[in-house]
Amino acid sequence: MEALSIVEDEVRELVRRRGLDPAKQPTLIKSLIEEVIKDYDERALLGAVPSLGSLDAARQTIFDNVAGFGALQPLLDDPTVEEIWINAPHQVFCARGGQSQLTHIRMESSEIAALVERMLKSSGRRLDLSQPFVDCQLPDGSRLHVVIPDITHEHWAVNIRKFIARAGKLDDLVELDSLSRQAALYLSTAINAGLNVIVTGPTQAGKTTMLNCLASSIGPRERIITIEEIFELNLSLRDVVAMQTRLANLEGMGEITMRRLVKEALRMRPDRIIVGEVREAESLDMLIALNSGISGLCTLHANSARDAITKICTLPLLAGPNITSDFTVKTVAACIDLVVHCVRSPGGNRYVSEVLSIRNRVEAGQIESSTLFERRDGSLRASPGADWEHEKFDLAGINVAELMAV
């Protein structure tokens, strides 16, 4: 360890002298490390300094510490790791296949703080006593969330969610057994016809992946505006504008909220709006946008498809006391067409458990809904007597009942 520390210090000093940027010039950093290790190894052969041991291991460790994210870099490079979190310097966890496990990694408190500072460098976001939370995107697309004391009891709480997209379109979900072929055909047809869809489920149920897969069915001539807290969507479409929120600066100015972005999106000639996740009062602005003839997709945390309907009717009430439940219920019934509910099994498998159709009809304050697909005997199947018809299919000239029969 002493030898590694000596070489790492020499590399860092040369990086400073030559004005290199480790994040943007990895090739030069690797050459520099090779140069320093070669010189150090020659001195070690003469007995002047301690031996480095395995040179390959030393190269990788020093590169991870200087140009990467230190002890966490092997986990970030591991394609099987979905998420990494730190509860304390001696408690570093990761998740593989939906299952959490305690790693062998041990870090000092100062090392964690320095690591987070490096992670935040490219994001432009800050973390201090006045702003004890931070949520941002790392250069590789992973999502970083950090909470510091005294919000946490003693140690920094760090969470890195890697976006590992094993599916890019609905057919991929069929191959992964997360979706049936008939349901994939129906959802693809629904997106083409402009139906408004909410993707629901608990945390880590695959909502963002499902949203990406649904978006892959959008026509190539449509103009898409995406709205997110942190960029996570990865759409392979031609005409896309991606926007994310912004925190207030040190003077408390410059904050850009989800509500503001939804309103701005309406001025950008969208054919379709995609809201990464609806959490609060922005749900009202989204519903108003959908009620103006614009198609939309979004995700929502919920325990079931029907719970999602209740939640999307309740969230707009957070916008102010002048918003009534009667208004939101009728608006949801008029705007939302489908709810796709995703779940994660105890074994870590992610799949669609239900597809619910919302009808433009309200009885005694309750929105009429119909289950189109439900999971029975381990597979997603069409519900008996499912009503496939929708006026948007008719407007698009699609005979969906015939399509489903085939």
Image (cartoon, rainbow, N blue to C red):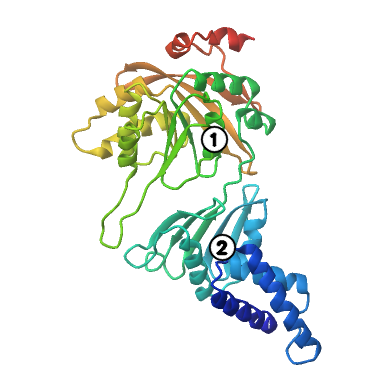
Q: Position of residue 270 (x, y in %)?
A: 39, 29
SS at circle 1: helix
Dividing the image into 4 quarters, which one contains the N terminus?
A: bottom right
Q: Amino acid at mark 2?
A: Ala
Q: Position of residue 4 (x, y in %)?
A: 68, 79
Residue receiving disc 2: 23
Q: Quadrant of residue 366?
A: top left
Local crowd size for mark 2, using a 10 Å CA cut-off: few (<14), some (14–19), many (≥20): some
For residue 134, above or below residue 376: below
Task: Name the residue: 60% across, 64% down.
Answer: 68
Q: Which mark is residue 212?
A: 1
Task: Name the residue: 50% across, 62% down.
Answer: 119
Q: Residue lying farthest left? A: 322
Local crowd size for mark 1, using a 10 Å CA cut-off: few (<14), some (14–19), many (≥20): many
Q: Position of residue 164 (x, y in %)?
A: 61, 46
Residue 315 appearing in the image: no
